[in-house]
Every structure is written in C-alpha cells, then in structure tokens.
Amino acid sequence: MEIELTHEAFHPLQPWRAASHLRELLMACGVLPAVDKQICSFERWLVGHLADITDPDHAQLVRRFATWEILPKLRTRAEKKPLTPASRRYAGDQVKHATAFLGWLAEHGLTLPTCRQTDIDAWHVEHTEHGRNTIRPFLLWCMASNLTRRFRLPAAVIRQATPLPQHERIDLLGRLLTDHDLPLRPRVAAAIVLLYAQPLSRVVRLTVDDVVHDGDQVLLRLGEPPSPVPGPVADLLLSWIPNRDNMNTATNRDSRWLFPGRRAGQPMHPDALSALVNDLGIPTIASRVSAIRQHVLEMPAPVVADALGYHQVTTAKLAAQAGGTWSRYASGDHTRSPVGWVPQGTGNS
C-alpha cells in the first residue's frame, strides 16, 4: 500500500494506533512536518465522525463548524503550548453535541433557521450540564454566522473541585517521601502535584532541563523564576532522572522528557500517569486545588502565577475565594524568588 507523505493521508488509515505511531516516527525524523499530537488525533477522529453522519446537510454544517471554528482555535493554542488530551476531548464533545443538536432539531421538525428561543430552552432543559456547556460554542458560532436568529443562552457553569484539607496534603507528601516501597515514577509526579499545584498535563511536558542546579540548591522551572525544591523532594527527583522508564528503546534513548512515553519524541500520556498516581491513593485534582489555594494564601497572587505557570487572573480569583489578605505587594525586583522561600509544608524537617 502506498500513500502520500501528508498528514491528511494518515487520517483514514487503520488500525489507527499503528498509523499514529508511524506518523509520530516520521515527524520525529523530520519527514513529516511537526503537528501537535492532539490536533492529529482530533482530525483523525473527525474523519470517522463525519462519515457516520447520515444527513449530508448535517455533515456539511458540522464539517464547517469543526473546520472554521474548532480547529483554528486548537491551532492557535498549540502555537503557545502543547495541547492536552482534555482539550482534544472537549473539542470532540463540541462536535458530538453539535451533531446531536442537529438531530434533535430534525426529530422535532425543525432546522437551524426555524429554531426559536423556546426550542433552545427545551433542549437545555432536557440535557445535562456538560451537554449545555459543550453546545454553547456551536450555538454562538451559528448566531455569528447568521445561521440562526439571536438566542439568549444560559451562562456556562464551571464547578471547582473540593480541595484536600491542608494536613491531608502534607500527610500524603510525607508518605511519598518515606515509603520507599512505592514505585518511583508516580511518587515523583505526585510530589510535583502536591507541592506545586501542577496538573499532570503540565507535569508530563517537563524535561530534565527544567531541573536546574544552582549551587547546592535544586530548582524546578515551572514558570519564572524557577521554584526551589526542598531537600527530600530534590533527592527523590534526582534519583528518578537516571532511572527513568521507557528509555531503552531506539526512539527514546536520548529523550529529554522527565516522564518519557513509549512513542517517538512523545512524553508519557497524562491519563496513564494519572492512573499510576491514583493507584498511590493521591487524588490529583483535589491535591492540586489544595496546593494552589495554600500558595495564594501565603504569597501575592501575581507571584504565585509567575512562579507556577498560572494566569494571574486565575490566581487572583483563587486568592479571593480562599480569603487571602494580599491586596498588594512591595515593588522591587520580582525576577528572583524570595530568599529562603519554599512552598508551605516543604521544609526538610
């Protein structure tokens, strides 16, 4: 079988896992232009999804929505930083709910031009919160494209996870540092989550070059400036680097990823790492929420945002929700961490 050496030619190939592996090898070797892995995954999935839509008018609308609304946003985000599997799943959910909405209209004898506000309200009543949130981009696109009349849409609902109590977060960190029978890879990943409030989608993008040696101190580059790593955690981190998994294959022998994956040039999948961390009894989302709340209580929100790679608006909102008292902080050189600063509960004792 012969195909063109283009990304488009790989989309319909089966079995798709083997095709994806081959495409990643070709990108790693420079034969194919580098494209974000999650965009490749979405485009491959979209081909199959469109083929399953029986109504040609619906298929054309969904194709237009995906091509002119979803994919440009994904590509723009990918230019700034690699997309996460969660971003790809959300993009797929938007397409699936757009398809379902068009089918729902047809079942009720309606089309986009004849759809009324009462129909929009009825759809929202019949569907889940996730469905209501994911149909919103499609309806906004339809209104902006003059495919429908103007509608009043309910505001998107974003729920936050309940954080761990601070003492539980510290206890979990202590178990990671003292229980040497636990596997090393998830111990290191979980420690980064518990200390620095990092989602695993960011943790897997760390490289060994993000572990910085500054004299006798070890720093971890999550934002700017790099964050100091407490002694026991630094020992754990440094013991992991020369013993990383997935380094014995030809495609990964020189990998710089802190958590290398099995595929050429790719880090470990965050879902796979999440499963390993969860097996240790570490609730990743609750732990991350607990850590970031503690940081914004201890330091000004802008400092936390810069050091941990968060948006300043996000940390400001978290600080307000947590009841932080930092309304401002002193002027001066903020390019360096405060002398002796480490996150709460990360001392060597």
Image (cartoon, grey):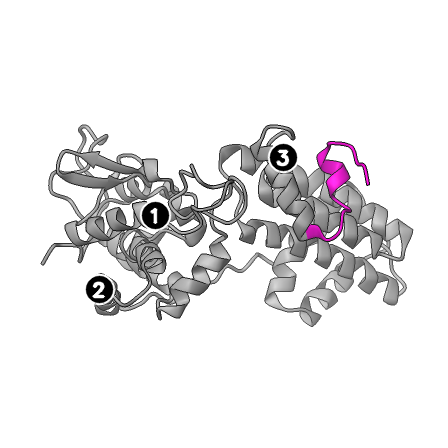
Residue 151 % position (x, y): 71, 53
Q: Residue at x 31, y 45 (%)?
A: 242
The answer to whether residue 205 is visible is: yes
Mark drawn on residue 315: 1
Nearer mark to the viewer, of 2 and 1: 2
Q: Residue at x 73, y 32 (%)?
A: 6
Residue in the foreground of this view, choosing between 76 and 244: 244
Extreme residue toward the left, this view: 349
Magenta-tinted stretch:
1-16
Q: Is residue 259 left or right of residue 295?
A: right
| 267 to the left or right of 185 | right
Q: Secondary structure at mark 2?
A: helix
Task: Tell me residue 226's x, y (percent).
Answer: 26, 37
Characterize the local packing of mark 1: few (<14), some (14-19) or many (20 or more) Cα atoms within 10 angstroms.
many
Visible in this render: residue 42?
A: no
Residue tagged 2: 170
Q: Are marks 3 and 1 in contact (CB under 8 Å)?
A: no
- The x and y percentages for residue 87 are 56, 49
